[in-house]
Amino acid sequence: MQTIDKFNFAGKKAFVRVDFNVPLDENFNITDDTRIRAALPTLKKILADGGSPIIGSHLGRPKGVDAKFSLEHILSRVSELLGVDVQFANDCVGEDAAKKAAALQPGQALLLENLRFYAEEEGKPRGLAADASDEEKAAAKKAVKESQKEFTKKLASYADCYVNDAFGTAHRAHASTALIAEYFDADNKMFGYLMEKEVLAVQKVMNDINRPFTAIMGGSKVSSKIEIIENLLDKVDNLIITGGMTYTFTKAKGGKIGNSICEDDKLQLALELIEKAKEKGVNLVLAVDAKIADSFSNDANTKFAPVGEIPDGWEGLDIGPETEKIYAEVIKNSKTILWNGPTGVFEFDNFTHGSRSVGDAVVEATKNGAFSLVGGGDSVACVNKFGIADQVSYVSTGGGALLEAIEGKTLPGIAAIRGY
Ligand code: AMP
């Protein structure tokens, strides 16, 4: 497999798929440029070699051409961070893009307009009437798949090589994230540095495991984490199920949970997961106490209660001190750690304590030699809020992509380059 480090970009044009889907405020100012910074090593290497990156990305979820989602909003920041005056093509497959790509000189860079201005990027039909028949839907799908080939070919035609550095969209078989790779032979397609790091981190957690391996799964709903929890039961020694999911498990076991968040249609599933964990010899760790509140608000009255004895009118919004101790003990004795999701409503300052204590334990374990991977939207927000992002082994930029990789799924963006 080709690697970016070995590749010499001198005199070459590289189509680089990045994830510049950054948050913008109402005046289109970037509020967090982490994703742009994350792609800089790859882009800088191409420029330093004397190559020319042609940068493609999506921004937001436009339904067609929509100035709100124009990548022009981020052009000056990309130029500033990259240290070159990046050119802009106002239509990713228009004449302007073809001309500017063809004229690009070594050391120059071109940013293409939002790839998702075209339905062909995702390969999903747009603008179908709500009452469209199944035949109409199938015809529209076929049409967009057909035109997707032309779209992909056009993007590929700008460049001599293809670099995928967009881990955040690696779980999507889109034109620029996967299909485009077909137009380049094995020597001329590769992961960017960010993608390489992400793939390596997932590999370490999934295949290259030092034991004990502990997964901490938080978040609100069992239903959104079920596949990953089932897959993890085959891999981990300890599984901490926490956050809002706690109360579905507690109720399933016959506990009283007051007004706590609960999926009543998943009670049976929770019992089955408890059984499965037992069968597989996995230590399933659930909370024993909770910080409860008399309303869903930061300013609610609070107290601590055993997790299965929450009075009516009260709800669990974080774990309690006994649970913190139990989790910390398990985490500190681990050699591989995966953390996805908070222990409570960490957005409210009065309910961050549990998540912070998990963060502290993960940091301590990491200091003692454990490999710790933190990923999935909210846990990244957590480690950033607690200022510990640089004290864990790896913070993934991928939300859905990371979870699908851990579920054991093949990610199209990775398979398109690596072959599996
Ligand atoms: P998820 O998106 O499934 O990873 O869930 C993350 C969300 O779960 C965060 O916004 C938390 O506020 C929320 N959450 C965690 N614990 C609780 C809880 N005990 N009650 C309600 N929401 C919770």
Image: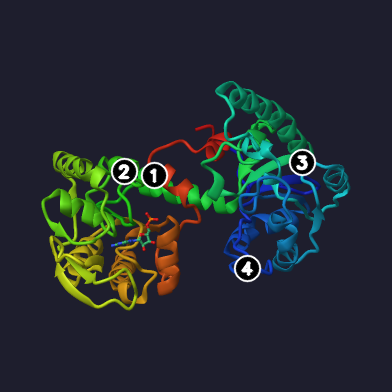
The quadrant holding residue 27 is bottom right
Asked which secondary structure carries label 4, the reply is loop
Look at label 4 and name its amino acid.
Answer: Asp
Q: Which residue is mark 4?
A: 25
Disc sitting over residue 159 in the figure:
3
Look at label 1 and name its amino acid.
Answer: Ile
Q: What distance separates the C-alpha of mark 1 from that of mark 3?
A: 32 Å
- x and y, in percent, of residue 39 in the image: 62, 57
First-in-chain label (2 vs 1)? 2
> Which residue is painted at 62% across and 28% down in the image?
141
Q: What distance separates the C-alpha of mark 3 from that of mark 2?
A: 41 Å
First-in-chain label (3 vs 2)? 3
Look at label 3 and name its amino acid.
Answer: Ala
The color scheme shown is rainbow
Q: Give whichever of 125, 176 is nearer the camera.
A: 125
Q: Give whichever of 291, 216 is nearer the camera.
A: 291
- x and y, in percent, of residue 289 in the image: 16, 66
Disc sitting over residue 149 in the figure:
none
Asked which secondary structure carries label 1, the reply is helix
Q: Give the left or right position of residue 61, taking residue 183 as reference.
A: left
- x and y, in percent, of residue 285 in the image: 19, 55
In the rendered image of this protein, does residue 389 appear above or below residue 409?
below
